Image (cartoon, helix red, strand yellow):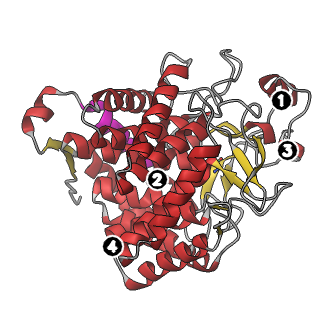
Amino acid sequence: MKKVSLSYFVIGIALYTLSGCSSKHAEKADYTWLKYAIETSAAQLEYTVSEIGDSVLLPRSIWTGYDVNFLCQQLEKKQLIGKDSARLKPIHDNLGSRRYCFSIYDWTSGFFPGNLWYAYQLTGNEEFKKEAVKFTNYLYPLREYKGTHDIGFMVNCSFGNSFRLCPVDSVRQALIQTADNLCGRFNPEIGCIRSWDFGKWNFPVIIDNMMNLDLLFYVSHLTGDDKYKELALKHAETTMKNHFRDDYSSYHVVSYNNDGTVEKKCTHQGQKDDSSWARGQAWGLYGYTSCYRESKNAEFLRQAENIAALIMRRVKTEDAIPLWDYDAPDMPQTPRDASAASITASALIELSTLVEDGQIYFDYAERLLKNLSSEAYLAKVGTNQGFILMHSTGSLPNGSEIDTPINYADYYYLEALLRYMKVKGLNYKLSLIHI
Ligand code: GLY
């Protein structure tokens, strides 16, 4: 998006008209917070795009330094589990500056293009579409990549949204090719898609992998071939059996032996092996909600509802934005994870539409969204290196991205705003006036 368009756009957003398809709704409710959330998000993305210019860079988070002793206290351990200690000290010249994906093969590379697609959908501003196409195109080589389960995230959030909003054949092909590559990571003996190719595990599967299933569901719809969906549902069944504890909290990592027995259950990003890592619970909730949407299998619905209940029961903060792990020390300085809240909000809105009495889920999601849209989490325009939300936590045990903005927090926040407006029958009309 060129800087020249900014004046039009700022005027445009000043003239947003929020209108409900049901005018009764719109008159009664106060949607000032929502209008402000969309205006701020759009302005932040426009600012980011103008800063990047024509460089091939994908924003990810902000470089931050940490106090190792504080992190060890959070973990109630003497040592961090990662090897990233260099990241812990404020040694970077670039501390406080925007951190970009290391390449298109970074697991978060699809989120920034996805944010631009969502901004286009929210505002109707064609400049966002133009930028979304440009940033999505950078990722085209990913259709050949087989090195991680994260290709589901990377390609669905970028090319998936691209095809949904502006279908073209090459994008369809990229989605199918990626889905085939993701299926290539499925082991039928184990009944799961392999998550990572690094580390000491035999066949690691992480709860996050539930999020890659949406690509497979989407490609089943695109092609009319159920094989993608069936494989995804098998993965979800195996994960339901082995990842969850009696209270419906989940392990982060379950590694399997080649015969399908469990080798090990542990964590890589949570507080300890049997703790409830906040984003992991959100990934599980979102994943099983998708599985129920696609299969109408009541077991998946029960799983999603039980995870939702766990999240609502275990949250310790007044504003319901969780601490980075539900078992982390309950102290004011414990970092929160806004990304877990935005994923949860998006999932709960969908869940609310799939059950008879979904109001409890919708109300909780609305509370999360209003709190994320408050000044405690929503950045002021021109600050936060152009990211929308503050206060997410990537991987505390690895000393990485703690209490910082992160692109996927923004992605699921925008998605939740869209889902919220759909349920409420709300629509934004953008009135651009040329001066
Ligand atoms: N999928 C990696 C994470 O949630 O941090």
Instruction: Compute the Cα span from label 3 to label 1.
Output: 15 Å
Q: In this rendered view, identify the residue nearer to me: 76 or 5.
A: 76
How crowded pointer 1 is (Cα within 10 Å; few <14, some 14-19, many 20+) is rated as few
The type of residue carrying mark 4 is Cys
The type of residue carrying mark 1 is Asp
Count of numbered badges drawn on the protein: 4
Residue that mark 3 sits on: 82
Q: Which sits earlier in the primary sequence, circle 3 or circle 4?
A: 3
Residue that mark 1 sits on: 67
Residue that mark 2 sits on: 45
* Rendering quarter of residue 143: bottom right
Q: Which sits earlier in the primary sequence, circle 1 or circle 4?
A: 1
> In the rendered view, would you say 104 is above or below 389?
below
Instruction: Compute the Cα span from label 3 to label 4.
Output: 41 Å
Q: Nearer the viewer, mark 4 or mark 2?
A: 4
How crowded pointer 4 is (Cα within 10 Å; few <14, some 14-19, many 20+) is rated as few
Please report the residue visible at 43 percent of the width from the left and 52 percent of the height from the top: 291
Estimate the x, y position of residue 325 in percent, counting from the top left: 65, 29
Q: Nearer the viewer, mark 1 or mark 2?
A: 1
The type of residue carrying mark 3 is Gly
* Rendering quarter of residue 348: top left
Q: Which residues are magenta?
A: 31-44
Image quadrant occupied by the N terminus? bottom left
Dot label at residue 166: 4
Residue 35 lies in the magenta-colored region? yes
Q: In the rendered structure, are the residues bearing label 3 and label 2 in contact, judged by CB atoms less than 8 Å apart?
A: no
Within 8 Å of ligand 1, the CB of disc 1?
no
Secondary element type, mark 2: helix
Q: Nearer the viewer, mark 3 or mark 1?
A: 3
Please report the residue visible at 61 percent of the width from the left and 26 percent of the height from the top: 323
